[in-house]
Image (tube, rainbow, N blue to C red):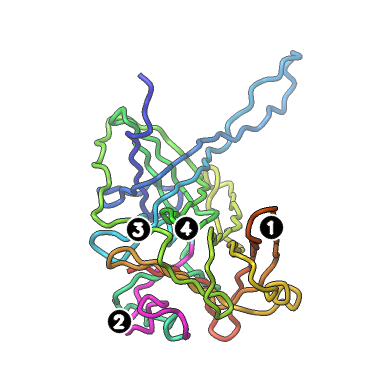
Amino acid sequence: MALKTRGIITQVAKETTFNTLATFTSDDVVKTITASLNPKVDMVDRKCLSCSVVKEAGIPVRYTADGSVEVEIEVQDTSTDLIGSILYEAGFGKKELPATDTGCLIGLEGDGSTSANKISKPDSGVDGTATLYEVTDGDVERLSLSVRKFFDSGDAVIDTTGVVISQVSLKFSQADILTASFSLEGAGFAQKDGLVKPACATTAVLPFVGKNGTFTFYGTSVDVSDLQIDIKNTITNVEALTSEGFSDKLIVEKELTGSFKCLLTDFSYLTKLKNQTVGELFTKVDADTHTVGVYAPRLKISDVQVTDDSGKLIEVSINFTIEKDTTSGNILFLGSK
């Protein structure tokens, strides 16, 4: 019988040692929209003469995997963390719990109109009323993950190890569920049988939907659609004779970009593009008693495209690049509570 996608259960856990399978628990189950993992074998050609015109089969030298995971953006039942929190932490680079004063909640207690409502650097180790995922410019722990995928056959799994997040995409679309997708690069895989399949992940909290939100760009409120923010992590594979395959995967560069659409009301965006004017971005969306917010303190517009199809309102697409703020040192924050 063919296997069905409805029976898939995905677990994601932090590794103690790179490319060594983590210990999974029921808390590691992530409710996913999609979870694709593609095992691969890197082969090397034989060097010797084979006394035949037929090419000999190569020899496997390393086992890798790539794929992606997509989740709805929603808060967990028992904490302010997002569902699949370890994926955000690995993709952004750092997770913190801000202090309890409202200035630390990246606008979750305000409208983003002042800096105090957007971000205040949390004190180290202080618990608070929100979770903060942060892109930083310093030395941060590189998280490698193990991903286990159960199929509806019950006890059969594919384990992928040494997984590093190569890209994060946050998608805030109007009148639709907000989503986050994660591109994965792994350093090993194995197939196993006879494991106990965990229960499906269920939550009482509803996901965030793109409506009744707040969005400010260059300090001005804008009615936007199809907001997307991307974090692209450039990964370098470390190889050594003393290891099997890759001995490590290191993130050596981060590129942060984004885009959105809105109706054209003036030509100020073209002026900002030409002059490379520095601005900022803040957005937040509520769901019941929960809130998710994004803040980028420094960005520049990189491209402006105007669509003037006949019989329609004129729409403009804005692309931008997120940079490190030279005063605060902050780059990008995603907060949830």
Seen from the viewer's position, the closer of residues 200 and 107 is 107
The disc label shown at residue 174, or none:
4
Q: Position of residue 49 (x, y in %)?
A: 75, 21
Label 4 Cα neighbours within 10 Å, binned few <14 / some 14-19 / many ≥20 = some
Distance between mark 3 and mark 4 Cα atoms: 16 Å
Seen from the viewer's position, the closer of residues 93 and 199 is: 199
Disc on the earlier residue, 3 or 4: 3
Q: In the image, what residue occupies the spot 32% across and 34% down?
A: 7
Q: Position of residue 46 (x, y in %)?
A: 68, 27
Say if 277 sits above or below 183 in the image.
below
Amino acid type, label 2:
Thr
Let me know if residue 334 appears in the view: yes
Image coords of residue 163 (percent x, y): 47, 49
Give the residue at x 54% y 74%.
Answer: 281
Q: Are marks 4 and 2 in contact (CB under 8 Å)?
A: no
Q: Tell me if residue 259 comes above or below residue 22 in the rendering.
A: below
Q: Which mark is residue 100?
A: 2
* Residue to which mark 1 is pinned: 307
Amino acid type of disc 3?
Answer: Glu
Query: Dominant secondary structure of the magenta stretch?
Result: loop
Mark 3–mark 4 CB contact (< 8 Å): no
Q: Earlier in the sequence, mark 1 or mark 3?
A: 3
